Amino acid sequence: MKKRYLLLALIVLSAASLFVGVSSISPLDLLDVRSEETQIFLISRLPRLVAILLAGAGMSIAGLIMQQLSRNKFVSPTTAGTLDATRLGILVSMLLFANASMLEKMAVAFAFALAGTFVFMQILDRIKFKDTIFIPLVGLMFGNILSSVTTFFAYRADVIQNMSAWLQGDFSMIMKGRYELLYISIPILIIAYFYANRFTVAGMGEDFSKNLGLAYRRVVNIGLILVALVTTTVVLTVGIIPFLGLIIPNIISIFKGDHLQKTLPHTAILGAIFLLICDILGRVLIYPYEISISLMVGVIGSGIFLYLLFRRKAYA
Amino acid sequence: MIQVRALSKLYGKKPVVEDVTVDIQPRKITSFIGPNGAGKSTLLSMVSRLLDSDTGEVLIDKFDVKKMKSNEFAKKVSILKQSNYMNVRLTIRELVSFGRFPYSKGRLTEEDERIVDQSLDYMHLTEMQDSFLDELSGGQRQRAFIAMVIAQDTEYILLDEPLNNLDMKHSVQIMKILRRLVDELGKTVVIVLHDINFASVYSDRIVAMKDGKVVKDGPTEEIIQSDALKEIYDMDIPIQEIGSCRICVYFSS
């Protein structure tokens, strides 16, 4: 898995993504800045592409960091309750502030995502039985409990319909003015890269980290904050994209190992590629309608996840 | 020199390490022996700051370890705990490079690369340096960890039961390497061992612990005596001299 091939695939798919859609746009149309095609391109297509790239890279890196810090290959925002905690946070923000602005929602959802992830890590610390499969199951149960709390209050407050919009990841609603929050992922990815070596050391355990003079707790906390931030921005703008943070880091790990400084760029790029493929397929399969991205990723992702489970003994 | 002064650790109300005072001589192998639950590993963890002590202090070269910065401490003392649970997929070279983390925070200088090369060479791992750790046998993995500790280049090396899960051949190999670290590189090695014969054959000094206290502390030949071992293990253990080695024949006592 050479970085250069991944980059090439990313560029080709990005270009394809820009010119696939209900209204046909050709590169020539863009020469006329005032044409309708150019407007669609700038208001819808380009934001959609940027959103896909940022969400794909962001969720994959969030998963990678979680797997490293929890020392379990099957932990990710999907399997650790982070996504469910984020949704609960969005509900709370909707109930507290009737017309919550994006930033208010963001702040409350972030606080919940962070708290949820911390609680999961605390549970992890206390479990004696550290089986690779058992831990993500605990995370899924924890997530489902949060999720049922969300459903209960959403039902009481009559906002179920409203909430389900956050449940389904969907890029078709992405337009200029509705996705800019995702740009927060860029500095996060840079910080993650800066911390890559520390995360790798932390992944070898607390004693090991202390032996090398690493401030273990602080590094873990920073990692969880990054994860919660990325997850919140993605859920708020796109919705829930399952499995991405689970499968992409695992695929890279098989080929390149777990030295984060070396694998972080690959993980980010492959995450973006995978999401692009799912999005393009979703747009083409039942043209002119669209299959939502969470369904596409769910179907393809769960297949890959099963494959990873079955070949687990070979590498994990 | 490592000086342990009146060190205690309680789990709940039960003392695991109780009022331990012991000096660890520089440039020697000191083995900690004793029955299970004697507090050997706990003591080692406190010396290496993995665990906080409840009372007492540990001085390394006259400095209180609690007051040292973690980064400076990591350049002075390294500890290897028995970690069977390691599912990070790194190559041997990547692991050994992390031994330089206290110095370079992962951005390796030429000097660091040179030290990594030397450490790999010293442990005869140069040829397999690009293999992943999870593809290695127990003995090879243990050698990789020791190579990392060598790259960390600390004066003091602490090992908690490094022979666990190793077969005879690899155990002997590891002990010989530790001996070389002391004799050739002038390191100070402190090691928790279960097999008293390995302690007898390879160490300079032995500290015996029982119920959280130090019961014997002295040069190896003074501790490997039937009456001293009776006090430590509560067993009658005859000792045979074979070549220059004193072997404890504890199997039928």
Image: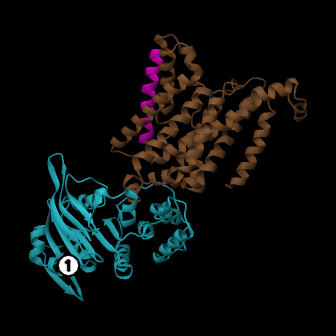
Rendered image quadrant of residue B152: bottom left
- Magenta segment includes A142: yes
SS state under label 1: helix
Q: Position of residue A210 (x, y in %)?
A: 38, 55
Chain coloured cyan in the rendered structure: B
Nearest to the observer: residue A46 or residue B103: B103
Viewport quadrant of the C terminus of chain B: bottom left
Q: Is residue A228 depicted above or below B232 in this figure?
A: above
Residue B224 at what x, y percent from top left? 16, 78
Q: Nearer the viewer, residue A55 or B253?
A: A55
Q: What's the amino acid at mark 1?
A: Thr
Residue range corresponding to the magenta coloring: A134-153
From where the camera sits, is residue A77 visible? no
Residue A63 visible to an observer of this rendering:
yes
Q: In this view, does B206 lie above or below A287?
A: below
Image point (22%, 62%), residue name? B40
In the picture provided, is B57 more to the left or to the right than A195?
A: left
Q: Is the magenta stretch mostly helix, strand or loop?
A: helix
Give the chain letter at badge 1: B
Determine the colour of chain A: brown
The image quadrant that residue A299 belongs to is top right
Does the magenta-highlighted stretch encompass residue A25? no
Q: Where is residue B235 in the image (x, y as percent from the top left)?
A: 11, 70
Q: Which residue is drawn at 68% across and 35% down?
A: A52
Specify few, some or many for label 1: CA neighbours under 10 Å numbering under 14, 14-19, or 20 or more: many
Residue that carries the numbered disc 1 in the rendered image: B220
Pinpoint residue A35: horizontal percent, then vertical percent: 88, 25
Q: In this figure, what is the number of numbered marks? A: 1
Q: Which residue is drawn at 66% across and 28% down?
A: A179
Q: In which quarter of the image is the N terminus of chain B?
A: bottom left
